[in-house]
Image (tube, coloured by chain):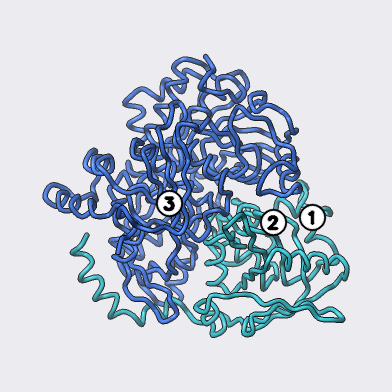
Amino acid sequence: MAKTLFEKVWEKHIVTTLSDGTSLLYIDRHLIHEVTSPQAFEGLRLTGRKVRRPELTFATMDHNIPTEGRFDIEDPISKTQIEALEQNCREFGVRLYDLKSSQQGIVHIIGPELGLTLPGTTIVCGDSHTSTHGAFGSFALGIGTSEVEHVLATQCLLQKKPKTFKVEFTGRLKPPVSSKDMILKLIGMIGTAGGTGYVLEYRGEAIRSLSMEARMTICNMSIEAGARAGMIAPDETTFQYIAEGNRPFAPKEAAFEKSVAFWKTLPSDPDAKYDRVLTIDASSVAPQVTWGTNPGMVMDVTGCIPEPDKVPGYSRKDVENALEYMGLKPGTPMTEIKVDTVFIGSCTNARIEDLRLAADYFKRGKTANSVKVLVVPGSQQVKKQAEAEGLDKIFKQAGCEWRESGCSMCLGMNPDQLKPGERSASTSNRNFEGRQGKGGRTHLVSPQMAAAAAIAGRFVDIRTWKI
Amino acid sequence: MKPFKSHKGLIATLDRSNVDTDQIIPKQFLKSIARTGFGEALFYDWRYLPDKKPNPDFVLNAPRFKGASILVARNNFGCGSSREHAVWAIQQYGFHAVIAPWVERGETKIPAFADIFRNNAGKNALLTIELSESEVEEIFQMVERFPGLEATVNLEHQRVTLHLAEEISFHFDMDPAVKDRLINGLDDIGLTLKKDAEIRAFESRHTAQL
């Protein structure tokens, strides 16, 4: 029978299926960070259990660490959490990429960098953006702390088989429109719960022509559509990414060739059936900007803030609440909205390609007066590469702050936060109320749109705007 | 895990859709390494004013909802971050169950709860109940009309009963696997560890494949 990419990976990992239909799924890679793991390790201690496969478990610290003065964590509670991770990794024999490591970074950025993220594997992490790794054709999903404990103890996860949803992007994207705009467009169309219960598979000409970095941005935000995971079939672009660079956990030489032969069997069969299908013409996608308080409240940059009763999928009250929080009036053109802060970073858009695209704008223009711009590389390796290319100098000369790697203002667990009423253009993934700081107003955009907003001091249509 | 069979208590309504886990428990409370102490921080940004006094405009601060143990909200409850702290905060505040509606958009049925939140709730015996939009709307209206309205959520019979002079009762669907675990208070890890022979057999053939 014809199978989808997801079904092939799923079936390869079933240890057993219980009588109630739940499957015990084997997990190839378990990624850990400081915020969602301490209670799971504590659970193991209380029950006298061990980590079953410590060599398949990889930890880093990314969520609550400062991006300047990173070795002097002032917040005692944050410090305790970091120390707890160090202690837990020591006690249970888990490899840790700590703040001193040249390979530390946001967990979803270092997985691919280290060669941990490979096609056909199952990957979990106590973080919803684990969907990022699906860009390689892995089944990767975010889990809660109880499930983290379950995977630590058993290397397995209990799962009901999700449904499949094919998202076909036809045509070609027209730069400077980017993959961030593609995924925001999709979420705008299906809503933040439109993917709940499904694994999304992104396909089509527009997907095939994207780099791995751009594909990761799309899979990363699958969770913002509510999806269990997002996946893209591996191809030559994938194989090349895995082969190049220093990826210590990727197969090499004969093992690599053998793996490629297996990876080539993974793409969905031509006549595979999906539970749901949607087609989007990528060539018609415009730069996207969110206007509300969830990623589904999004529009073309050429649009105006909507009237409360004219937004499909949202009640009048939902829209009124969102506009009140965002401090926006219906009818205002998006390009008249000014920004106070620009954040370029996060597991969505802090890979080297994202920084290159943003730097290309800052080469040509300085940040507008009074706009604060934070550029936060996704990992130490991204930082090193960017500095080797001189991108840090471009950012600094344009008036941006160049920081150390971490999650930073994406969720503001560290000191990088918006103040009440401050408005940001952010390359991150969530514009929820208070996410980037209590009272902060977040507009999600691509790195190019964020850089242009930093220079213009307001949102601009980067297809027509001239510096 | 403590078994969940049935619970009777006061209903509180929160008239919001897409309630995200950042809103349920803001990030500054995720720095704790404990599993307890989150109840005070539930809905922190909505619940407290800048001077940390209770916000009188936030519905859960209304005297009529004091002591509520069944929360009713709108569609896509618990979206966003995977933080299990959201479930812990809801429980530690005093809720035993959350009720939300699935909605129909064209030909698709959108579930009431976000995936990871619903999973996390199941692991902690916080009952998540999906009803239709009109049923949830009816609960909202009844709570407005009859202050102090209580309900019983019975997992065994999969029913929500509103305790009015003339009782109203709704059936809800529940995954039999989740129901079995909740009613019997089963420990997932303990059960999985009993499959050790199967896991070992899988490991011996699977490593070769990678």
Q: Quadrant of residue B132?
A: bottom right
From the viewer's perspective, is A428 left or right of A101? right
* Chain B palette colour: cyan
What residue is disc 1 on? B58
**Picture coordinates of residue A4, whole percent (x, y):** 34, 57
The residue mark sitting in front, 3 or 1, is 3
Residue A302 is left or right of residue A136, and the answer is right
Within 10 Å of disc 2 (Cα), the crowding (few <14, some 14-19, many 20+) is many
Secondary structure state at the residue bearing disc 2: loop
Label 3 sits on residue: A166
Q: Position of residue A42 (x, y in %)?
A: 47, 68
Residue A350 vs residue A141, the one in the foreground: A141
Instruction: Point out the tag, 2 or 1, that comes first from the N-terminus.
Output: 2
Which amino acid type is marked by label 2?
Phe
Distance (Cα) linking label 2 and label 3 = 36 Å
Q: Are marks 3 and 1 in contact (CB under 8 Å)?
A: no
Tell me what hue chain A is rendered in.
blue
Residue type, numbered disc 1: Phe
Q: Position of residue B184 (x, y in %)?
A: 54, 85
Left or right of residue A346: residue A16 = left
